[in-house]
Image (spheres, helix red, strand yellow):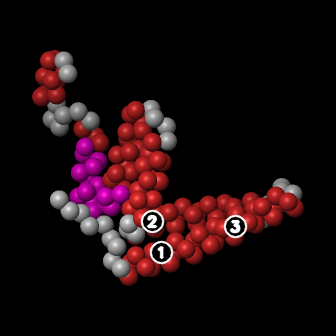
Amino acid sequence: MAEEEKDSLVTMPHGREELIKMEIVGMIHGGESPYDVISHVAKWLEKESGENGYAQYVDEQIRSVYGFALQHVKPMEDELRDVKARLLRIQEAFNSPDFTEEEHIRIGFAVDRHKKNIKRLEEMIIRAKADHKELIMEK
């Protein structure tokens, strides 16, 4: 780091990237989920780095590892919300007369799969809540 850049950091009240730092602290003070904080930072990093898809990748990894593998409730609830939203869009397509009979059959399969996935997620969330699989932060 150049000497003049170091000097400019000293004169900044909160250092570089003040806005994101204040947003993180605000989210923590607001009691938001650590998963949401990580996701927020990932979105900021994606924007700053120009690496499209980074935030989505982080969210998918959180859901896979903390949700499905470690059975934490919040990531599974987020996945359930998204699956339900997709189901609504698929059902709208199914009810549309714009598709052929064959396409309606395929869309019907997608509707069935989403309904089964919703049931599976709901059962996993019930089990995780019963087992108290919430996020436990350790040092």
For the stretch drawn in magenta, the main secondary structure is helix
- As drawn, the residue found furthest toward the front would be 69
- Counting residues from the start of the chain, the first of labels 2 and 1 encountered is 2
Residue 91 in view here: no
- Residue hosting label 3: 111
- Distance from label 3 to label 2 (Cα)? 22 Å
- Residue hosting label 1: 124
* SS label for mark 3: helix
- Counting residues from the start of the chain, the first of labels 3 and 2 encountered is 2
| Quadrant in which the N terminus is drawn | top left
Q: Give the amino acid at mark 2.
A: Phe
Residue 133 in view here: yes
Q: Quick one: label 3, few (<14), some, or many (20+) residues within 10 Å?
A: many
The quadrant in which residue 129 appears is bottom left
- Distance from label 2 to label 1 (Cα)? 8 Å
Q: Which residues are magenta?
A: 21-35
* SS label for mark 2: helix
Q: Give the amino acid at mark 3.
A: Val
- Residue hosting label 2: 68
Does 26 appear in magenta?
yes
The residue at 76%/66% (across/down) is 108
